[in-house]
Amino acid sequence: MTHSNPSEPVPHELASDRPAITRLKQGNIAGLAALVQKYQVEAVHTALLIVRDRDQAEDIAQEAFIQAYRKIDQFDDGRPFRPWFLRIVINAALKSAYRQKRSVPLEEAEDGQFAAKWLIDPGLGPETLVETAEMRESIWKAIGELTPEQRAAVVLRYFLDHNEREMIQDLNRPLTTIKWWLYAARNRLRNGLLQGNVKNSEHQEIDDE
């Protein structure tokens, strides 16, 4: 296991998580409490985009923290905690989705508003917020039409901004498979948004790169 050189500059995220991780590796449960406080909301949001059920997403987040606690000795102190942890969240969400073997329609997804609010930019003005609210509902509905694998790929690429190399590690799949998932997901999202009468200029972020 490699460790960062103490003399080298330490990224803010890495530095802010290091005390909690150190305590956790020493067996101090207070370290886990600090990480839960910092990452719980993001963990639930990430899981919810894949499984589309609030209670299930909360259970997945809790399970992911337990897994992180059990695997903390495998964590490389020289790397940021967030990507490593969210990889655990996504894998747990995928396993849960596989067990369910179903996609939850929008009308059955009681927490669509909860997840959709995560898609909005709090810095937007009132006029733009109205259009964005419609857009986020369209995105939420379109995501529901994707397979769990496609949802995971979309979350990693467009919500968590992971690159291709990171996604290979996250999903444990070859690049060709990941590219196909993203291609299929973009097409299905684009078609779903167009069917919802959303202007192309409003969803250019999902266009092919």
Image: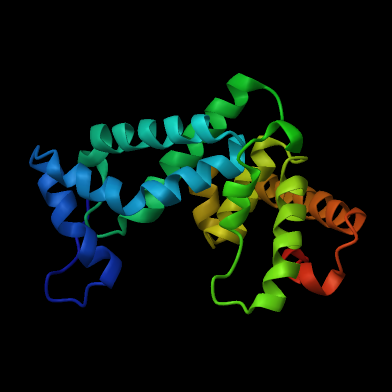
Query: Is residue 152 shown above or below 59?
Result: below
Camera-side residue: 102 or 68? 102
Here the colouring is: rainbow
- What is the quadrant of residue 15 in the picture? bottom left
Query: Is residue 42 shown above or below 63?
Result: below
Residue 105 shows in this picture: no
Residue 7 shows in this picture: yes
Percent across and percent down for residue 37 are 28, 50
Query: Is residue 39 shown above or below 9?
Result: above
Camera-side residue: 119 or 81? 119
Quarter holding the C terminus? bottom right
Number of callouts in the render? 0
Percent across and percent down for residue 65 are 32, 37
- What is the quadrant of residue 126 in the picture? bottom right
- What is the quadrant of residue 177 in the picture? top right
**Residue at image location 35% in from the left, 51% down from the top:** 39
**Residue at image location 14% in from the left, 38% down from the top:** 29
Percent across and percent down for residue 90 are 50, 41
**Residue at image location 79% in from the left, 48% down from the top:** 184
Going by the image, does 30 lie left or right of 35?
left
Going by the image, does 86 lie left or right of 107?
left
Going by the image, does 71 lie left or right of 136?
left
Percent across and percent down for residue 13 are 29, 66
**Residue at image location 54% in from the left, 63% down from the top:** 161
